[in-house]
Image (spheres, rainbow, N blue to C red):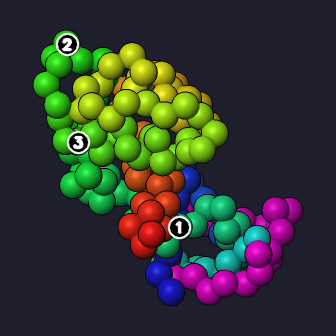
Amino acid sequence: MPMFINVRPGDMAPIHASPDNFSTIHVQVPHGIKVDAVFFDGLWYHVQWSGVSGFMPAICLSAYDPSPLLCQKRYGTDEFSVSQTSECNQRIVNLQADLNLFFSPFEPQIVIDGVFGPDTREALCKFQLIRGLEPHGIADDETKVSLYIATLRLRKKSKRK
């Protein structure tokens, strides 16, 4: 089945000779690349990419393409930061709704008003910190992709209810 390398943009995921972290690494595969994968156990997949076959930690793989193109429809292409305008923006509404979904029920929910204010920035910084991103409070491509993937299954679940 096709899977995608989902590590931090710019990072690489290793294909090991055997399903353990101490085995020889055959090759490093860049973030976002599609590989063929077969489930092996709870922690590893058997993968093939560019003529190389081996094992990859499950944490490095996603069934969803982590490219920015997927989340552009939901969040747009602009980077968001604290705005000077008070007009509602549907892309920011989606961002706020997904931040609330990510933190629910453990954090206080932010107001979904379509304005990127201080509460949205604070929630975004917390999200970035949790996901291992630089907590700068700007909704850049890396942050939007991470939020999109982190909430994809949660959004599908909430639609079924």
Residue 90 counted in the magenta span: no
Q: Nearer the viewer, mark 3 or mark 1?
A: 3
Q: Position of residue 51 (x, y in %)?
A: 53, 83
**Location of residue 9 with respect to 88 vertically, above or below:** below
Residue 141 in view here: no
- Going by the numbered disc 2, the residue's amino acid type is Gln
The Cα–Cα distance between marks 3 and 1, rounded to whole angstroms, is 24 Å
Q: List the residue tagged with mark 3.
A: 91
**Location of residue 91 with respect to 111 vertically, above or below:** below
60 or 73: which is nearer to us?
A: 73
Identify the element where label 3 is drawn.
Answer: helix
Q: List the residue tagged with mark 1.
A: 62
- Going by the numbered disc 3, the residue's amino acid type is Arg
N-terminal of the two: label 1 or label 2?
A: 1
Identify the element where label 2 is drawn.
Answer: loop
Q: Position of residue 156 (x, y in %)?
A: 42, 68
18 or 124: which is nearer to us?
A: 124
134 or 119: which is nearer to us?
A: 119
Q: Which residues are magenta?
A: 16-42
Q: Quadrant of residue 23?
A: bottom right
Q: Residue at x 16, y 17 (%)?
A: 85
Q: Position of residue 141 (x, y in %)?
A: 34, 41
- Left or right of 39? Residue 136 is left
- Going by the numbered disc 1, the residue's amino acid type is Ser
